[in-house]
Amino acid sequence: MTSQSKPVVVAMNSDERSDYGFARVRDAAYDAVMDLWGRRKAEGMTQAQLADALGRDTGWLSRNLRGPGNWTLKTVGRFVEALNGEVELKVHGIEDPLPTPPNYHAYVGYEPEITATSTKATIPQMTVTRATLNGPLANTSVLVP
């Protein structure tokens, strides 16, 4: 491992840590609101209808849909209510295991399907079976002890 591949740890003072925590929460709330807004748009809701539901003009809405800026919990709550949504908030310790690994879906569809063939070779103290991979890694063979 080279020094270039090691993670860099940056010490933060309390103000920087506070700002970082705020940004993470704000961005997570924005992403959740945007996901729900995407669903509502697909169902036919317009920006004008959302602006009316929020009691705001379309210019304000347009600016806030481009990025969270300085969203408050009140702003998030207004968006959720206007979009007929529900909020679920969960805070956990950083040492707590996540219920689902954050990148669990990255390899869906790429896992090789392994099927054993009848080709066997006997090596002293071990029998080896040749397996053929199907799917994206087709035409690849591996030896399975």
Image: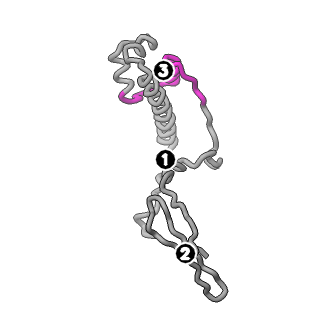
- Which span is picked out in magenta? 66-88
Residue 12 has which mark? 1
- Element under label 2? strand
Residue 98 x, y percent position in the rendering: 62, 46
Q: Residue at x 55, y 64 (%)?
A: 114
Q: Which residue is mark 2?
A: 130
Spatial CA distance of label 3 from label 2 is 57 Å
Give residue 108's position: percent from left, percent from top: 51, 51
The dot on residue 79 is: 3
Mark 3 or 2, nearer chain start: 3
Residue 82 in magenta stretch = yes
Separation (CA) of disc 1 from disc 2: 53 Å
Q: Residue at x 48, y 56 (%)?
A: 110
| 140 versus 17 height, above or below | below
Q: Position of residue 103 (x, y in %)?
A: 52, 49
Which amino acid type corresponds to the residue marked 3 in the rendered image? Phe
Earlier residue among tags 1 and 2? 1
Say which residue appears at 44% left-offset and 59% top-offset: 136
Task: Classify 141 as above or below 79.
Answer: below
Sequence-first tag of 1 and 3: 1
Amino acid type at circle 1 is Met
Residue 69 placement, left or right of 97? left
> Is residue 93 or residue 86 the one in the foreground?
86
